[in-house]
Amino acid sequence: MNSTQEAQAEENQQGGEVSVVLSGCAKDDAGTVFDVLRAAFATDRASADAPQDVTGKRPTVWAATVDVTEERVVSGTVRLGATVTADVQGGYWAVERLRHSLAGTFAVQVVGTVSGDQEEEVRLRLANKRPAPATP
């Protein structure tokens, strides 16, 4: 094994937990993103734990911890009412696996990263995928 493969194997053994924080979006859109994550991975958010609006002038954020160690196939189409900002934090391999999985359902744009020794934080912008153009 080369050093990159060894580092990835070690990270996989340490766990694949990623912290996901959603902000700047409607509760229904947050629920849609969490539903997709729950379908693809194990998460600490139960299906009955739907995002709720909070009264007051404070910004609302929703959070979940996702274990990306075992990925399941997600099928079907989902729609967001507007773009969603997701801040994800975890090991490099785990964050990339989560980003790749979300890209199967949403148009995903990386809008910022902060790197550390063993973890990174990435800000993602999630939007609806554009339908494929019709072929004549």
Image (cartoon, rainbow, N blue to C red):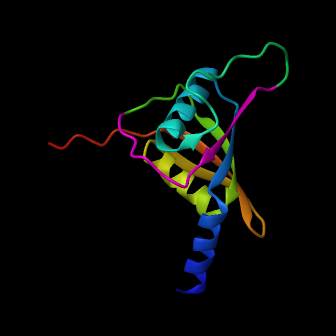
Q: Nearer the viewer, residue 83 or 27?
A: 27
Q: Residue furthest top?
A: 55
Q: Is residue 33 above or below residue 121?
A: above
Left or right: residue 117 compared with residue 106: right
Name the residue: 56% across, 29% down: 82
Name the residue: 62% across, 66% down: 13
Left or right: residue 22 compared with residue 8: right
Q: Residue furthest front?
A: 13
Magenta region: 59-76
Residue 113 appearing in the image? no
Instruction: Report the quarter where the C terminus lies.
Output: top left
Q: Nearer the viewer, residue 17 or 32?
A: 17
- Our reading of the magenta stretch's main secondary structure is loop
Name the residue: 60% across, 40% down: 43
Whole-percent x, y for residue 112 in the image = 70, 54
Whole-percent x, y for residue 86 in the image = 65, 42
In reply to whether residue 75 is colored magenta, the answer given is yes
Q: Is residue 61 above or below residue 70?
A: above
Whole-percent x, y for residue 88 in the image = 68, 48
